[in-house]
């Protein structure tokens, strides 16, 4: 049996802890090294995972010749620097979402990836959820015909992540668009077959974050330095003539316990809803409505599954399970949304 690939994780916070079970479950890789700029976090992570290779400087982990895969789990503003350095050092890289907050940064990552010949994957874990996998496999048979319209949203009520990595634009690159918009947008584009986006009309709002006493159920009061949007909506046009309506929020007065994340896809031969995984169509000859409920096989937790899939791709010469070009489309749409909101008119995407 081939030797297992050695994984070094950078940034041992909340999301890294969801990756560890994947590296443990992978037949192709194993956890080997950890890095965090916070010495206490690093020490605790090493103890919890039984890892002895601990680096307080992430560049030292990247320089470790035994590391094959670098798993970037830091806040957004470090993704580009660390990913590019790791690719230049000849490592394969899986990087948390958003791959980077700007298309320019993603372009730098793509250049470094192409020069290195290594794999780069964005950790879009919703693609690895059992229901999403089942729906995608069904849609890939062409059952909806051409998908000409989609509606998707990810809406939270009084539930902003009140941490500097998320609510300060200089750190995150944006608010719910960049934090959770990337999830539902990536999933929707993937289900649609990744059509090329060409124009966006969008709006951002911050009407609730700055109200006196505004709070998050996850982190107390919203501080005055919050400088990102709390709501956004967009209408996106694609090269193939299809369209998408997107809504995201951390703070909407919307009925939901945690978050309401949904997608509708409408094609010439049928419609589909995720996460219900219902397929709707019509028997025109007999004037009957047809509703099909897809079944889902139970599988690994999706954050873990994305790590297993990346190690499998590296070990077995497969393409990146979530290519950077698809993350570029996601960020180009969100960047277009911000620019459209600022200008008050639809913007053409020319990245
Ligand atoms: N896929 C998801 O569902 C999901 C959920 C939450 C967060 N995320 C993403 O994961 C990333 C991290 O988020 P989190 O919630 O784990 O944050 P976190 O604040 O819990 O953890 C980040 C860790 O990175 C460390 N760190 C910061 N800068 C560093 C650097 N330059 N080098 C090494 N370590 C550094 C911090 O000390 C901290 O321990 C973000 O990009 C975020 O968007 C994804």
Image: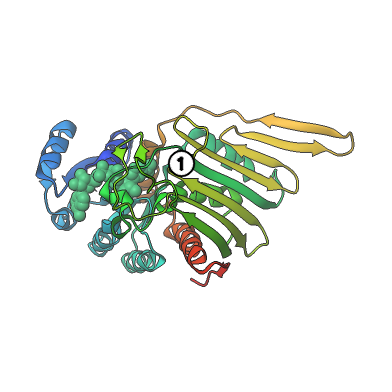
Q: Which colour scheme is used?
A: rainbow
**Closer-to-camera residue (45/142):** 45
Number of marks in picture: 1
Helix, strand or loop under label 1: helix
Q: Quickly name the residue at label 1.
A: 126
User: Can you give x and y, in whole percent of width and height, for residue 278 in the image?
Assistant: 65, 33
User: Can you give x and y, in whole percent of width and height, for residue 290 in the image?
Assistant: 76, 32
Can residue 207 be seen from the camera position used here? yes
Residue lying farthest bottom?
A: 350
User: Can you give x and y, in whole percent of width and height, for residue 318 in the image?
Assistant: 43, 51
333 versus 151 height, above or below: below
Looking at the image, which residue is at 55% across and 48% down?
188
Badge 1: how crowded within 10 Å, few (<14), some, or many (20+)?
Answer: some
Looking at the image, which residue is at 86% across and 39% down?
284
Residue lying farthest front?
A: 212
Looking at the image, which residue is at 68% across and 61% down?
241
**Closer-to-camera residue (259/302):** 259
Task: Locate residue 235 relative to residue 341 in the image: left or right.
Answer: right
- Quadrant of the frame with the N terminus: top left
The answer to whether the beta carbon of the residue marked 1 is less than 8 Å from any atom of ligand 1 is no
User: Can you give x and y, in whole percent of width and height, for residue 10 in the image?
Assistant: 22, 49
Can residue 10 be seen from the camera position used here? no
């Amino acid at each position: 049996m081939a030797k297992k690939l050695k994984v070094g994780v950078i940034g041992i916070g909340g999301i890294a802890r969801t990756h560890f079970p994947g590296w443990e479950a992978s037949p192709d890789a194993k956890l080997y090294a950890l890095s965090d700029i916070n010495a206490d976090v690093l020490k605790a992570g090493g103890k919890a995972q039984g890892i002895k290779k601990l680096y307080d400087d992430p560049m030292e982990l990247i320089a470790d010749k035994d590391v094959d895969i670098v798993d970037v789990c830091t806040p957004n503003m470090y993704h580009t620097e660390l990913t590019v350095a790791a690719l230049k050092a000849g490592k394969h890289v899986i990087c948390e979402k958003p791959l980077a907050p700007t298309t320019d940064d993603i372009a730098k990552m793509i250049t470094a990836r192409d020069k290195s010949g290594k794999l780069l994957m964005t950790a879009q874990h919703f693609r690895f959820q059992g229901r999403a996998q089942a729906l995608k496999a069904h849609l890939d048979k062409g059952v909806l015909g051409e998908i000409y319209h989609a509606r998707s949203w990810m809406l939270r009520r009084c539930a902003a992540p009140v941490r500097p990595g998320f609510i300060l634009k200089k750190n995150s690159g944006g608010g719910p668009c960049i934090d959770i918009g990337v999830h539902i947008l990536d999933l929707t584009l993937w289900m649609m077959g990744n059509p090329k986006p060409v124009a966006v009309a969008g709006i951002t709002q911050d009407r609730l974050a700055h109200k006196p006493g505004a709070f998050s159920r996850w982190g107390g009061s919203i501080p005055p330095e919050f400088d990102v949007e709390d709501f956004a909506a967009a209408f996106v046009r694609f090269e193939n003539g299809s369209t998408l309506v997107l809504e995201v929020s951390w703070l909407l007065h919307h009925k939901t316990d945690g978050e309401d994340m949904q997608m509708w896809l409408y094609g010439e031969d049928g419609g589909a809803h995720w996460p219900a995984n219902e397929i709707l169509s019509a028997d025109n000859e007999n004037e009957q409505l047809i509703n099909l409920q897809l079944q889902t096989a139970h599988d690994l937790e999706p954050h873990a599954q994305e790590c297993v899939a990346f190690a499998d791709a590296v070990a077995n010469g497969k393409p990146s399970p979530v290519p950077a070009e698809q993350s570029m489309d996601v960020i180009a749409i969100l960047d277009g949304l911000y620019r459209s909101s600022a200008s008050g008119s639809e913007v053409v995407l020319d990245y």
